[in-house]
Image (cartoon, grey):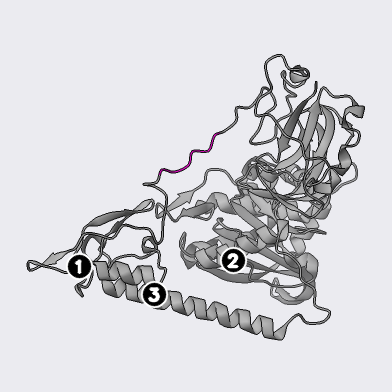
Amino acid sequence: MAVVREFTLPDLGEGLTEAVIVQWLVEVGEVVAVDQPVVEVETAKAMVEVPCPYGGVVTARFGAAGTEVPVGAPLVTVAVGAAPEDSAGRGSAPGSANGSASVAVPADPAPGAEGAGTDAAGSGNVLVGYGTSGAAARRRRILPSSAEAPSRRSATPAPPVTTNGTATNGTATGDAAGTAVADGPRTVAVISPLVRRIAREHDLDLREVRGSGRDGLILRTDVESAVRALGERQSAAARTSGTADAAGPVPGEERIPLKGLRGAAAEKFSRSRREIPDATCWVDADATDLLATRRAMNVPGAPKVSLLALLARICTAALARYPELNATVDTAAQEIVRLPAVHLGFAAQTDRGLVVPVVRDAQGRTVEQLSAEIARLTDAARAGKLSPAELSRGTFTLNNYGVFGVDGSTPILNHPEAAMLGVGRIAAKPWVHDGELAVREVVQLSFTFDHRVCGGGIAGGFLRYVADCVEQPALLLRSL
């Protein structure tokens, strides 16, 4: 007797909560081995092949290509210990995804059940959030008690409030009467029965109202203001919906879902603009000597050094002088957090969109080591093989938009980082050099920073040091 095991989408790490199925790597009825990849998914961070911790016959698949699957949702069911013919005829069972059978899965196999020992030892292949070194205990979801369950309309009315000895019985017009009542997970400062009635009539959740009275007491004016705001939001939504319905779809228009990598980038850009008060300064620099230094480094037989690696080394030297910029802001604690290591992100354009791979501990790497790591991460990014860890937790970003043939930019900070250096194209331009007009290789450098972590003096000092190192690469010797 085979034991049917359900394999769900594991936690892929870095706070990812869903993934989009790109392609299935197995068919229903196919025999799979322990740790064999069964599906390729795209997360907000990267493309990932997901291995199944069970060996046996695939009896069902859940979701077609393009389907968004939340973490914990079933991917496949596997008959552990079954022969391939055991799954014959299951492909047309009704109610199954992709024409596969819907199979009941026992919560835990009975002791001694046939096939149970197949995965008992575990595969040893671990993705973040689940391990296959042993049977994982099923988590039980504990439903909130009735006292804790949030409710919008079922709050018990407060007893009549007496003012100057006269019971109001819900008709009082005063604001300040009442006690405290538990309304969902937050205790709401009680209001007069009239105020509560206004909230109920307008379907207003009192947990969303902040009282202006003493000790947070919700007054009638607070509720009326909240009702007006709610009405304005609903009217705006109705107008928007009506306009869209009246206009209808435009012939030939293309709609692209903001999901996966594109959706994650959009959310991060929006959050950066909402939360970070950024500012940008820029300067032109003569990069002629920097290019000459790179040519001198790239002698035959030696590992190649990229221009981006030289700029990355300049960044780490500048951050050593201005550690205020290798930081983030903890908005909850209202603190600036200065970070000990430089995890240097760099923007890379791929067929799947813009990604920012991260070079870990860049401050301890030589130019050759930086060049090799940047090349490795770039190749992995273009192949869609970067891991979530290689795309997360950067502390500073280097953005070389000069590869697009543009001089300048005002980039959006890579939230929650506090600074970004932008590098434009290097082009031959007239330049005063040693007191004479000459044609030199000139680059525009821009520096975007979180104005909460520093003022213009720090930002200007950082950018000026970077420009000086670009113009005189020998200055880097002081920090080696």
Identify the residue at image location x=45%, y=62%: 452
Which residue is the site of mark 1?
A: 169
**Amino acid type at image mark 1:** Asn
Task: Residue 352 in the image: state x and y as whole percent.
Answer: 79, 58
Where is the C terminus found, in terms of image quarters? top right
Which residue is the site of mark 3?
A: 227
Identify the residue at image location x=81%, y=46%: 94
How far separated are the C-alphas under marks 1 and 3?
Answer: 23 Å
**Mark closer to the observer (1, 3):** 1
* Mark 2 neighbour class, 10 Å CA radius: few under 14, some 14 to 19, many 20 or more: few
Question: Foreground residue, 443 or 202?
Answer: 202
The answer to which of marks 1 and 2 sits earlier in the sequence is 1
* Mark 1 neighbour class, 10 Å CA radius: few under 14, some 14 to 19, many 20 or more: some
Please state the extent of the stretch shown in magenta in the rendering: 140-145
Report the disc number at residue 220: none
Which residue is the site of mark 2?
A: 270
Question: Foreground residue, 76 or 408?
Answer: 76
